[in-house]
Amino acid sequence: MVYNTIMIPRHADMDRVRAALKRSRIVALLGPHQCGKTTLAREFVPAGSLRYFDLEKPASLARLSEPETVLEPLKGLVVIDEVQRHPELFPLLRVLADRQPLPARFLILGSASPELLKQSSESLAGRIETIVLQGFRLSDLGAKTQPRHWLRGGFPLSYTARTEADSVIWRNQFLQTFVERDLAQFGVTIPSVTLRRFWAMVAHYHGQTWNAAELARALAVNESTVRRYLDLMTGVFMVRQLPPWFENLKKRQVKAPKVYVRDSGLLHALLGIGDRRDLEHHPKVGASWEGYAVEEVLKALQPDDAYYWATHNGAELDLLLFKKGRRIGVECKRSDAPTLTPSMRTALTDLKLDELHVVYPGAQRYPLADKVTVVPFAEYVGAKE
């Protein structure tokens, strides 16, 4: 397989890391393998620097055989990549981060959420700021790339593959390697075949509310076991559980999370979608676009909290975002000209929304009603022409 080696700037994520390093003594840049964490970190500290440690490489491991002796004299920004391989470093980082005056700050890179890196969350409480990195944002690539970005996803080597066939091969190899090798470093003992099958089943539930009973029956396990599988795949950034929002309303509200495969390219690989034609004719095309839009909106808006909302009477809202004290509703519509629906009216009233945005693949912004605006998707997520 051949990949395009052009560097694609990731300005938004660079700015987030810079801002975090000004505020915090330790910044954790977390995200799945191959999403670009190392490339981004090397923009701050070059790989050959004595302040850069890659714990997948024997030379870095040898240098850190006496970690306190090596790390204590360093000044400036220190990068430690794949930190989850050596969680015993976390107590030392706590000590080094508490020095006054502070000679060094630390950018640590890992492939799991703080819930899986329990020692970091316990040892570094109050000293660490976490940033989650996925793949390329649409705003990194430009509005015209949206069809390719949606089809291939945001993993750099999938997106930049020279052909669709190369991209599909890369994603399938990633799926296989992830369940067979990468999860083992977190102590996962679940058979890889079982996890791959579970992942494929989640892909078919993409954009739907979680139904543990159905998946448990299909896998011939109990509901607590499939919940454990789901939490595991969420913790390694492969799956998003979007929690429901429910208040003390008269309507009966849905209280199970929605599940999404976070990367659209991996979703398509799991569903056997190889090219744009396959995608357009697949029964999950609408759910795929919804999940893709949800991920890009969350990356762009960085809300304080995010939920979905649904009632048993059929009213629903794809995203309820809380940001700086405001309630923002977002509906993701894959249609040429979205119109106002009864569900939107209900959400606007019942949830007391400050504004409701309907994002769609078109090019024109227009109002639908008071507080309701249709906005082009690319514009909404900050992707320029």
Image: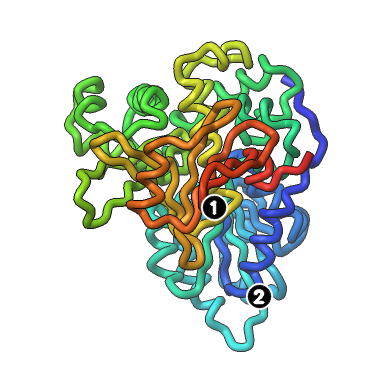
Whether residue 281 is situated above or below residue 246 in the rendered picture: above
Q: Amino acid at mark 2?
A: Ala
Vertical position of residue 167 compared to residue 69: above or below:
above
Mark seen at residue 104: 2
Secondary structure beneath disc 2?
A: strand
**What residue did someone put label 1 on?**
132
Considering the image in quadrants, where does the N terminus appear? Answer: top right
Residue ranking furthest to the right: 6
Determine crowd level at label 2: few under 14, some 14-19, many 20+ residues with C-alpha closer than 10 A. Answer: some
Residue 270 bears which disc, if any? none
At x 35% / y 44%, what residue is drawn? 346
List the single residue furthest toward the front.
369
In which quarter of the view is residue 43 placed?
bottom right
* Residue at 60% across, 53% down: 81
Nearer the N terminus, badge 2 or badge 1?
2
Rendering coords of residue 78 (x, y %): 66, 66
Q: Position of residue 278 (x, y in %)?
A: 57, 12
